[in-house]
Image: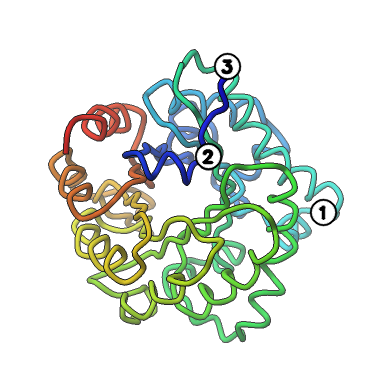
Amino acid sequence: MSVSPTLAEALADGTVVLDGGLSNQLESAGHDLGDELWSARLLAERPEAVTEAHLAYFRAGADVAITSSYQATFEGFARRGIDRDRAAGLMTLSVEAAREAARRTDAARPLWVAASAGPYGAMLADGSEYRGRYGLTVDALERFHRPRLEVLAAAGPDVLALETVPDTDEAAALLRAVRGLGVPAWLTYSVAGGRTRAGQSLERAFALAADADEVIAVGVNCCAPQDVEAAATTAARVTGKPVVVYPNSGETWDAGARAWTGRATFTLERVRSWRRAGARLIGGCCRVGPQAIAGIAEAARAPA
């Protein structure tokens, strides 16, 4: 029986395709995510819907499913009256739901599961993950992240996705929090205009992960497509590690109107430029659905 390669081994051989936005896939299936727990609410109420959303992306050509645990925290669940044991069970279920989708996928290629760990601001559900600088110390942020990372790691994902990180303090805390868990991780910042959301240089931000043995890839997510190429180039140069990128569609969220505006700027030509810049894990975030992932898969598997 052949043994599937690890994700790190696959990155050494070529491009790996990530999924797209889980929330927009769930919403397109008719699920209301207007809740502080966002997609994590469905782990308690409709876990089969989460599996079906992952399955849509695997069938579109994704190699990696990112779990619905981005907004799953002990503190957030507690506000909904869910105790720690039940919360831990739901975090574990997020990994199991993605594994179940992989089992249902009729694909000869290896498939992997990335357990999502969103930033502290995602728990606050007030948009502060796009600002960072919460007024907490690195030690306090590490204490927040470590318990749920322990639960997610114990669930057996292939990698921990430390994602949408807005500043270097939180990145430092996350890098400390994953030590000794026995599961590799990737670290992705949310950026704007060539800097972290908190305004720090990307050279400084990526340098934090350069010597972290647990980190198998670094990059950006939940950002504008036009910010990806320069960030990918910097990440590759500073760390020497494979680069992971999964930006938004390029449309803009109007909080007042509660609607997306503008046009998508996520194109296959951009995907090719990201590959040339060093990206090896490529997918999409908000508003990037299965159709776009199918295009990414075709482009990513073509000669660079």
The residue where tag 3 is placed is 104
Q: How far is the residue under mark 2 from the one under mark 1?
A: 38 Å
| Residue at image coords 50%, 33% | 26
| Residue at image coords 69%, 42% | 156
Q: Earlier in the sequence, mark 2 or mark 3?
A: 2
Q: Earlier in the sequence, mark 3 or mark 1?
A: 1
Decide which of 10, 71 is in the foreground and name it. Answer: 10
The residue where tag 1 is placed is 81
User: Which of labels 3 and 1 is toward the front?
Assistant: 3
Q: Amino acid at mark 1?
A: Gly
Cβ atoms at labels 3 and 1 below 8 Å apart? no
Q: Amino acid at mark 2?
A: Thr
Q: Quadrant for residue 102, please give it.
A: top right
Q: Residue furthest front?
A: 1
Q: Amino acid at mark 3?
A: Arg
- Vertical position of residue 30 compared to residue 43: above or below: above
User: Which of labels 2 and 3 is toward the front?
Assistant: 2
**Residue 150, percent from left and from top:** 73, 57
Tell me, yes or no, if residue 19 can be seen here. yes
| Residue at image coords 40%, 31% | 62
Is 303 left or right of 301, judged from the image as shown? left
Residue 6: assigned label: 2
User: Which of labels 2 and 1 is toward the front?
Assistant: 2
- Vertical position of residue 177 compared to residue 94: above or below: below
Q: Which quadrant of the rendered structure holds the C terminus?
A: top left
